[in-house]
């Protein structure tokens, strides 16, 4: 035990004591802070098959008074853990390894809890698969680690791995897995955010005393995201022209007129109304006000054909409906099929268009329009929504108006996403039709107005 003379120069010292024994005489007078928190390290030896084995055991009482122990191969590791335990016990944040979960177990429990919330209507079910996918990015390598042993350094190392490793796509039996481009920073950021939420969920339930993902976030910061994908006016003119010209070829390999009408409608709704893919597929006739030339957006259809609320509460909105969109919807009407929920867009089998089928049509349209691939591959359908936001800003809309039309939770999101299109002065939204007219070739515009 340290002598008093060695501590006279210190204003205070934390002096651990075993077995709730009283403080040393004169400790209080020397400004010592007394606590009944102590862990011990003991050497353990045993013989196994004639060979002497050695280990180091850390023993302590937890905050509930239960005896706990943990064994290590090296004394340094045992001493480090002893200090960690004492600090956590003093802070009231210690969780014994036997009372915690591994990262794999947390992911499983957290996802199950999210599905339970979805069943109660507290959240959308559609996004849970993305959460599971994001957690799996980390659990793939460190899923065996207990939450009490998880450090921000481990998580930061996994972030570095994800940034430097090319994504490998699963392949059908007998086929070689496809190696894709590196994972986007936005995807990694989302995955880290979901891990942070999962660890916070675990902390509230007593499985861990600190959030290593939050610590990693403070160390890493936000990862720089690539510029959003969008289209130029000239590219959009080529896309709209390709929808019409695509069917002049009578080859059997060319899509049907039903596919043409489908693509025209969904592309125009995304590019001219800023609607998300799920919002388009969840659209119903009674949400369209033909007289007011407006669409009410209040639902979204998930990949598994679940009709639920929009991505956020702010996603519920009313957007103007330009003439080309009205004409495109009229063109689609003959192909609509009656269904229980009154959904406008269904396949010829009256089912939800699968992502594979949807994007197969979309990528064929891009090729027909001569839209080149970027370093991230084919332009995503969501790029049409980004085009809408940019076109509205260019047409004179204010940032607040574009934020409302896109259904963003706040203007800051819009400002961050559309930095490239923000101008220094504010205008009124008077040109939603004008932004659509800039894209439509004159012959197509006249044809669609005639159809409407």
Image (cartoon, rainbow, N blue to C red):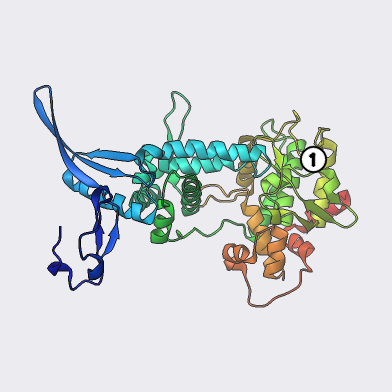
State whether residue 234 is above or below residue 47.
Answer: below
**Residue 96 picture location, percent across and down:** 36, 42
Q: How many marks?
A: 1
Q: Residue at x 72, y 66 (%)?
A: 401
Looking at the picture, tell me which residue is in the foreground, 403 or 291.
403
Q: Quadrant of residue 87?
A: bottom left
Task: Give the residue at the far right of this rendering.
Answer: 291
Report helix, strand or loop for mark 1. loop
Q: Is residue 248 visible?
A: no
Circle 1 Cα neighbour tier, 10 Å, few/some/many (<14 / 14–19 / ≥20): some
State whether residue 329 is above or below residue 257.
Answer: below
**Residue 374 picture location, percent across and down:** 51, 52
Looking at the picture, tell me which residue is in the foreground, 361 or 133.
133
State whether residue 214 is above or below residue 41.
Answer: below
Residue occupied by mark 1: 344
Where the N terminus falls, by quadrant? bottom left
Question: Viewed as shown, does residue 108 lie left or right of 391?
Answer: left
Question: Viewed as shown, does residue 266 lie left or right of 369?
Answer: right
Q: Residue at x 17, y 42 (%)?
A: 42
Q: Quadrant of residue 54?
A: top left
Question: Viewed as shown, does residue 172 lie left or right of 49?
Answer: right
Q: Quadrant of residue 56?
A: top left
Question: Viewed as shown, does residue 1 lie left or right of 317?
Answer: left
**Residue 349 picture location, percent across and down:** 74, 28
Q: Is residue 438 visible?
A: yes
Looking at the picture, tell me which residue is in the foreground, 284 or 144.
144
**Residue 157 picture location, percent across and down:** 34, 50
Q: Residue at x 63, y 74 (%)?
A: 423
């Amino acid at each position: 035990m340290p002598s008093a003379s060695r501590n006279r120069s210190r204003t205070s010292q934390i002096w651990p004591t075993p077995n709730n024994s009283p403080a040393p005489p004169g400790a209080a007078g020397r400004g010592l802070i007394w606590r009944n928190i102590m862990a011990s390290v003991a050497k353990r030896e045993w013989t196994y098959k004639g060979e002497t084995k050695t280990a180091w055991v850390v023993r302590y009482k937890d905050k509930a008074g239960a005896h706990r122990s943990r064994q290590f191969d090296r004394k340094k590791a045992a001493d480090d853990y002893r200090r960690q335990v004492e600090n956590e016990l003093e802070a009231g944040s210690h969780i014994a390894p036997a009372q915690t979960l591994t990262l794999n177990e947390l992911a499983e429990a957290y996802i199950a809890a999210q599905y339970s919330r979805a069943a109660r209507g507290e959240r959308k079910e559609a996004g849970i698969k993305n959460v599971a996918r994001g957690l799996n990015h980390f659990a793939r390598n460190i899923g065996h680690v207990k939450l009490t042993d998880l450090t921000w350094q481990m998580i930061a190392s996994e972030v570095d791995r994800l940034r430097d490793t090319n994504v490998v796509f699963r392949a059908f039996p007998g086929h070689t897995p496809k190696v894709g481009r590196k994972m986007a920073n936005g995807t990694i950021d989302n995955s880290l955010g979901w891990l942070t939420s999962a660890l916070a969920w675990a902390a509230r339930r007593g499985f861990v005393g600190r959030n290593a993902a939050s610590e990693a976030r403070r160390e890493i910061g936000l990862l720089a995201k690539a510029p959003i994908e969008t289209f130029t006016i000239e590219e959009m003119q080529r896309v709209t022209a390709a929808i019409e010209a695509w069917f002049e070829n009578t080859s059997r390999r060319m899509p049907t007129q039903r596919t043409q009408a489908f693509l025209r409608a969904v592309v125009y709704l995304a590019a001219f109304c800023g609607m998300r893919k799920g919002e388009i597929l969840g659209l119903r006739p009674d949400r369209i006000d033909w007289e007011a030339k407006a669409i009410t957006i209040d639902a979204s259809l998930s990949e598994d054909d679940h009709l639920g609320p929009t991505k956020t509460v702010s996603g519920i909105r009313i957007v103007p409906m330009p003439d080309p969109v009205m004409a495109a919807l009229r063109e689609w009407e003959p192909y609509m099929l009656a269904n229980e929920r009154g959904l406008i867009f269904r396949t010829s089998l009256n089912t939800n268009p699968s992502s594979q089928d949807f994007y197969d049509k979309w990528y064929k349209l891009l090729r027909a329009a001569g839209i080149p691939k970027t370093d991230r591959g084919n332009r995503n359908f969501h790029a049409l929504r980004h085009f809408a936001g940019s076109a509205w800003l260019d047409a004179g809309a204010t940032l607040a108006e574009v934020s409302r039309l896109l259904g963003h939770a706040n203007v800051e999101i819009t400002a961050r996403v559309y930095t490239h299109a923000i101008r220094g002065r504010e205008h009124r939204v008077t040109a939603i039709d004008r932004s659509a007219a800039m894209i439509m070739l004159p012959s197509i515009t006249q044809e669609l107005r005639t159809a409407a």
